[in-house]
Amino acid sequence: MIVDLAQGEPEERTLLSQRIRNALTDEIARGDLPAGMQLDEQELADRFGASRTPVREALSQLAVSGLVEMRPRRGVVVTRLTAERIMDMFEAMAEIEAMCVRLATFRMTPLERSRLMHLHEESLDMVERGDVDAYDAFNREFHEHLYRATHNSFMAEQAAATRQRLNAFRRTQLRQGDRMARSREEHDTVMAAIAEGDGDNAARRMRAHMLNAATALERYIVEHLGAFQVGAD
Amino acid sequence: MIVDLAQGEPEERTLLSQRIRNALTDEIARGDLPAGMQLDEQELADRFGASRTPVREALSQLAVSGLVEMRPRRGVVVTRLTAERIMDMFEAMAEIEAMCVRLATFRMTPLERSRLMHLHEESLDMVERGDVDAYDAFNREFHEHLYRATHNSFMAEQAAATRQRLNAFRRTQLRQGDRMARSREEHDTVMAAIAEGDGDNAARRMRAHMLNAATALERYIVEHLGAFQVGAD
DNA sequence: TCGCTCGCCTTTGTATACACGATGGGCTAG
DNA sequence: CTAGCCCATCGTGTATACAAAGGCGAGCGA
């Protein structure tokens, strides 16, 4: 499918290279561009109705954030994550989430706490309906709300960026067995610790929550081994 | 017998845009390019003996890692950090260091622990000599050794990247009063916890260590208020 | 038949050219 | 005299052109 980003709405004041970057980020996160896939600059330029220049800028930016790899004179490929690398990222994510919830517990305002509890309550309905997409969206909002509640903008940005990179895998993981229901239960224990103002306990529970998600994903990776590694060769 | 003949010096093989990126990263970290400074693409191109194209690629990459800010059609400036932002980054760094040392305590091999202790012992001499540059170099090695000892490559990369961004400020901080001697004492307490295999305690002490460094820096920022904010207007 | 080598072709990396928006100064009008 | 508008100029954003390196297959030799 050809999407002409250059002909966007007049409200599209952003740079072409930036729009291309966002589009590619989405496509990689969604798995439309599978790991290991070679990206041809001219082909992408044609697809976006642009020249190679903004495409190259977009790709070089993606390389910094680690979504693609640029090998000099040998082209760009979507980063091929090994199972080990994915688990490393999940573990790091678990630790980052833990440190965020710990700080957030100590620092969040009553309004923020109220909003968080409201969000959490709403998620019960999604679990009962088995609506994975809705729960996934809630999940993102829930965690990003926590990031902001740290009142540390840098930390919030880092956490959100890391979460973004694991996006493609999180949804997969939520479809494993009763993982969604478990996920909400775990949120529940974290919320309890937050309510008590026990940041360290909230952190421990959040870490466990994230590591459980990683374990659920690991099962999937083992079952479908190579799905993320082999890519589209 | 197979001999890899491709062992030549990779110096000339690196991309021009990458060399420019590294050069600019250094100059920003060292403070040669002060915060708030407007960067003219053509001027940089002339200085590096290149055209604007690789310069632009380098700048757009630096924008992703946050060292510069690109405002569409309004040019690139070295990111102007507010005192609050710097403290946020230091706090995040403290948490990241804490989580690294916690994991490292549990996972480091005997060889890694031995190497770390050796490093630490060597630093005593630098403190006594008052050699800030040597201690700064040691400090980097010490902490990066810890990152690697987490046996989590992703976490190690994230930590190193964050540390890199705070580079310009760390050296400043070390020159404050008896900060260097204090720093080593704090390292000492962390080492003790590591030796006992008490990861949680090591994490707490490391967090305190980093926050102490931040506090030392804060005094400097207050005294020289605006040095980092105003830049070269 | 297999393997090596040479050379063409594809694709990347860099330079240059062109387009368009932003900024600043001067001119005019009130 | 001041304020606001217009135009010139500069610098960024994108496109195109050119250079060079890597991949790959044909051809040759063992």
Image (cartoon, coloured by chain):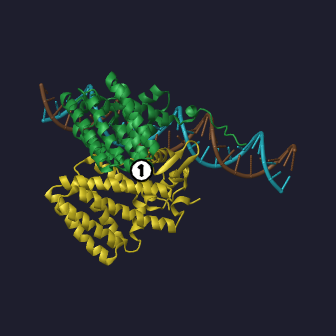
Chain colours: A yellow, B green, C cyan, D brown
Given residues B155 and B100, the one toward you in this image is B100
Q: Residue B84 in the image: state x and y as whole percent.
A: 22, 40
Left or right: where does residue B40 sit relative to residue B207?
right
Left or right: where does residue A218 sit relative to residue A41?
left
Residue C14's place in the image compared with A129, above or below, is above
Name the residue: 49% across, 32% down: B51
Q: Residue B79 in the image: state x and y as whole percent.
A: 31, 37
Given residues C1 and B123, the one toward you in this image is B123
What is the residue that sits farthest to the bottom in this orientation? A129
Tag 1: amino acid: Arg
Residue neighbourhood size for the residue with mark 1, other residues' Cα within 10 Å, grouped as few (<14), some (14–19), many (≥20): some
Instruction: Answer yes or no: is residue A16 visible.
Output: no
Q: Residue B10 in the image: state x and y as whole percent.
A: 57, 34
Residue A168's place in the image compared with B44, above or below, is below
Given residues A189 and A127, the one toward you in this image is A189
Residue B164 occupies which quadrant of the picture? top left
Name the residue: 50% across, 62% down: A1
Name the residue: 22% across, 50% down: A151
Q: Residue A33 in the image: state x and y as whole percent.
A: 50, 59
Residue A187's place in the image compared with A47, above or below, is below
Query: Residue under circle 1?
Result: B107
Instruction: Answer yes or no: is residue B78 visible.
Output: yes
